[in-house]
Image (spheres, helix red, strand yellow):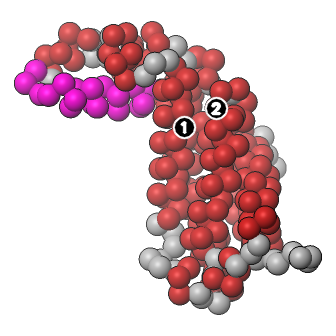
Amino acid sequence: MSPNDDENRWRGTSSDERIDERRDRMLVACRDIVGKQGGSALAVRAVCRAAGVSPRHFYECFPDTDSLLLATYEQSVQQLLIAVTSAAPADFAACAPDPAAARRVLRSVFDTAISHLEKHPEDGRIIFGEALTNNFLRTHAVMTLPKFMRAVKELTLPAPARQRKARYGSLESTLLAGGLAAVFIEWLSGTSDFSRDDLITYCTDITWAVLSTQPDGK
């Protein structure tokens, strides 16, 4: 779609509606470019060409490509979180289920996460690959991935297992986020020698061991 076609398509709509629609198309374009070619391929001209917008329209939505990349990353993380949230029954954690049930739900969470990344490999590259290699995105990923793990913890673990000292809660989420990101990067690369089931089992076992064990000490 050319910029002229874009203008004709949205004639009669409000300015805000046109801006929002173009922004969505640029997010899709960024996800496709970065997810397939890497962050080095992201440029204003490439995004405009893929989204069918003009450079003027680009700068109406984003001050630069870093801002577009961050918005795309946050959208990918949010979509993954929505997917894994669906793996746990409503109010599951609030009911304080027995550990065996919680562990089954945790396994389902990882199964669902892997299924989502298999269907949307671009999200996997952006969340786990680009976020750790791109200098701009890395500073945000350091905060976002631990937050994601804390959300998984709140979603799946019974209340007693979540009653941890605050200083450990932050450390465990950071530890898991870094370790699991490395495992997912290896799996997404296609060079790993472990199966899909191996990946789910390992992630479940390690996450459960870290999140459900009360450390010694005061």
Secondary element type, mark 2: helix
In the rendered view, tell whether residue 100 sits above or below residue 50: below
Q: Residue at x 32, y 15 (%)?
A: 57
Q: Is residue 18 magenta?
A: yes
**In the displayed structure, does residue 164 sit left or right of residue 45?**
right
Is there CB contact under 8 Å for labels 2 and 1?
yes
Q: Pick whichever, 200 or 44, lies toward us.
A: 44
Counting from the top left corner in percent of width and height, residue 77 is at 54, 47
Q: CA distance from mark 2 to mark 1?
A: 8 Å
Q: Residue at x 62, y 24 (%)?
A: 38
Q: Is residue 131 visible?
A: no
- How many other residues sit within 10 Å of disc 1, few (<14), some (14-19) or many (≥20)? many
Q: Pick whichever, 163 or 138, lies toward us.
A: 163
In the rendered view, tell whether residue 120 sits above or below residue 108: above
In the rendered view, tell whether residue 45 sits above or below residue 133: above
Counting from the top left corner in percent of width and height, residue 122 is at 55, 37
Q: Is residue 108 magenta?
A: no
**In the displayed structure, does residue 217 sit left or right of residue 179?**
right
- How many other residues sit within 10 Å of disc 2, few (<14), some (14-19) or many (≥20)? many
On the image, which quarter does residue 11 sit in?
A: top left
Q: Amino acid at mark 1?
A: Tyr
| Farthest-out residue, front | 218
Q: Earlier in the sequence, mark 2 or mark 1?
A: 1
Identify the residue position indicated by label 2 in the image: 137
In the rendered view, tell whether residue 211 sits above or below residue 17: below
Counting from the top left corner in percent of width and height, residue 106 is at 64, 72
Specify the segment rendered in magenta. 11-30
Q: Pick whichever, 5 or 161, lies toward us.
A: 161
Q: Residue at x 62, y 47 (%)?
A: 144
Q: Which mark is residue 73?
A: 1
Q: Main secondary structure of the magenta part?
A: helix
